Image (tube, rainbow, N blue to C red):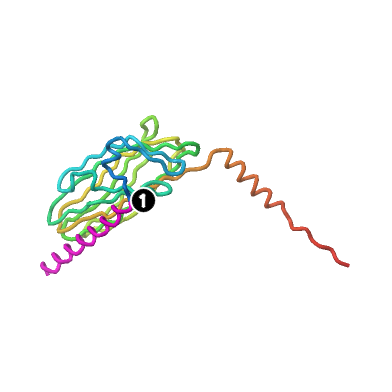
């Protein structure tokens, strides 16, 4: 049984490595670039002022962690895995601003894989507004013997920008991994867009096709 579990852990590790390799080839942006001062924009959202720190048995080279841009956020992948009782932590902080729309929510998605007693893989976010006020938190996890929750979301009072403090934790057990972490943000349009949309809906409600009268 122990040998079977060990082979299962090794198979998971190999599968994760293959997924990381394919993800890395699709994106030139990495945590090393962001920690070095790079920023990026997706739609109306801008991301900047990244700070990243890796500790423990995870790869300490930030260039190993690809960042893929999504339509409303970004995806983080890389060697987020530990084996045979190792442990590691990734700390990531950054700021998000909206050009014209305003931010009203955030979501987090991360699938975890854990094998062995005490194995755990989790991601936690703390969100803060422009005046450093707490807006909410996000938490996803997979813990051997406890269960898992791969997604979480939070809505908050509209703000033009916010900061995120993220912690990724992996450890203990035989194997623990988080293949990808998706961070997304919800916005609402600026007042002009809302007015145009409302006017269009009202126009559709009043429009009627002209009936052809026949005798």
Front-lying residue, 110 or 142: 110
Q: Position of residue 191 (x, y in %)?
A: 57, 38
Q: Position of residue 21 (x, y in %)?
A: 26, 56
Vertically, is 173 above or below 156? below
Q: Residue at x 67, y 52 (%)?
A: 204
- Locate residue 197: give its quadrant: top right
Q: Position of residue 210 (x, y in %)?
A: 78, 58
Residue underneath mark 1:
152
Q: Residue at x 62, y 43 (%)?
A: 196
Q: Residue at x 12, y 54 (%)?
A: 85
For the question of whether residue 154 can be seen, the reply is no
Q: Is residue 41 left or right of residue 14?
A: right
Q: Main secondary structure of the magenta part?
A: helix
Instruction: Specify the segment rendered in magenta.
Output: 1-26
**Residue 153: within the magenta?**
no
- The C terminus sits in image quarter: bottom right
**Residue 16: within the magenta?**
yes
Q: Position of residue 140 (x, y in %)?
A: 30, 51
Label 1 crowd (10 A; few <14 / some 14-19 / many >=20)? some
Q: Secondary structure at mark 1?
A: strand
């Amino acid at each position: 049984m122990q040998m079977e579990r060990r082979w299962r852990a090794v198979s998971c590790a190999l599968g994760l490595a293959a997924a990381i390799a394919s993800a890395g080839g699709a994106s030139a942006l990495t945590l090393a670039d962001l920690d070095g001062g790079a920023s990026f924009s997706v739609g109306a959202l801008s991301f900047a002022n990244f700070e990243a720190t890796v500790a423990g048995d995870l790869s300490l080279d930030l260039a190993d962690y690809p960042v893929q841009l999504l339509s409303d956020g970004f995806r983080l992948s890389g060697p987020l895995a530990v084996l045979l009782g190792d442990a590691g932590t990734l700390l990531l902080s950054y700021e998000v601003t909206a050009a014209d729309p305003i931010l009203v929510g955030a979501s987090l998605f991360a699938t975890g894989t854990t094998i062995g007693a005490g194995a755990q893989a989790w991601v936690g976010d703390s969100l803060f507004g422009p005046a450093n006020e707490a807006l909410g938190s996000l938490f996803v996890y997979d813990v051997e013997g406890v269960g898992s929750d791969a997604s979480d979301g939070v809505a908050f009072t509209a703000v033009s920008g916010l900061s995120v403090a993220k912690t990724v934790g992996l450890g203990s057990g035989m194997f623990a991994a988080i293949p990808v972490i998706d961070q997304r943000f919800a916005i609402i349009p600026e007042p002009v867009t809302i007015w145009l949309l409302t006017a269009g809906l009202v126009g559709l409600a009043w429009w009627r096709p002209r009936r052809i009268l026949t005798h």
